[in-house]
Amino acid sequence: MSKLFKLMLEAILSPEKIVKDTLIDKKTEVNQAEINTKNRFFVNQDGSIALNPNNEDVQKAFAANIEKFRSIRKG
């Protein structure tokens, strides 16, 4: 119980240490993700998968899908 109490006190008295580390990690993740144009997908730490909008193949496929939907809508 004392470990939990000590951990809670540390979090209350020095939240900048916790928040600072979290923000730094997220900023570097975003920068690395923006630079990467080779991979089609990103796998986040929580296991979710996202398309890489900077990849040329993904951009072409997205544009083709938009054109297909436009033709269906007009048709």
Image (cartoon, rainbow, N blue to C red):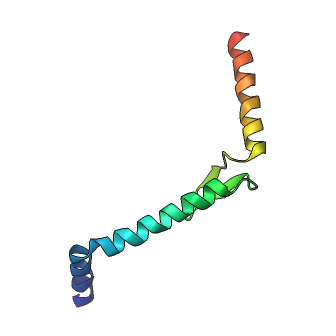
Q: Position of residue 23 (x, y in %)?
A: 42, 64
Q: Position of residue 63 (x, y in %)?
A: 73, 31
Name above or below for residue 7 compared with residue 33: below
Name above or below for residue 28 compared with residue 60: below
- The residue at 42%/68% (across/down) is 22
Tally the numbered discs: 0
Find residue 61 and report its image quarter: top right
Q: Position of residue 20 (x, y in %)?
A: 38, 70
Q: Position of residue 67 (x, y in %)?
A: 74, 23
Q: Quadrant of the N terminus?
A: bottom left
The answer to whether 36 appears left or right of 19 in the picture is right
Q: Residue furthest bottom?
A: 2
Foreground residue among 32 and 43: 32
- The residue at 71%/35% (across/down) is 62
Q: Quadrant of the C terminus?
A: top right
- The residue at 56%/65% (across/down) is 45
The answer to whether 38 appears left or right of 51 in the picture is right
- The residue at 54%/64% (across/down) is 28
Find residue 15 and report its image quarter: bottom left
Q: Residue furthest top?
A: 75
The answer to whether 18 appears left or right of 6 in the picture is right
Name above or below for residue 40 compared with residue 12: above
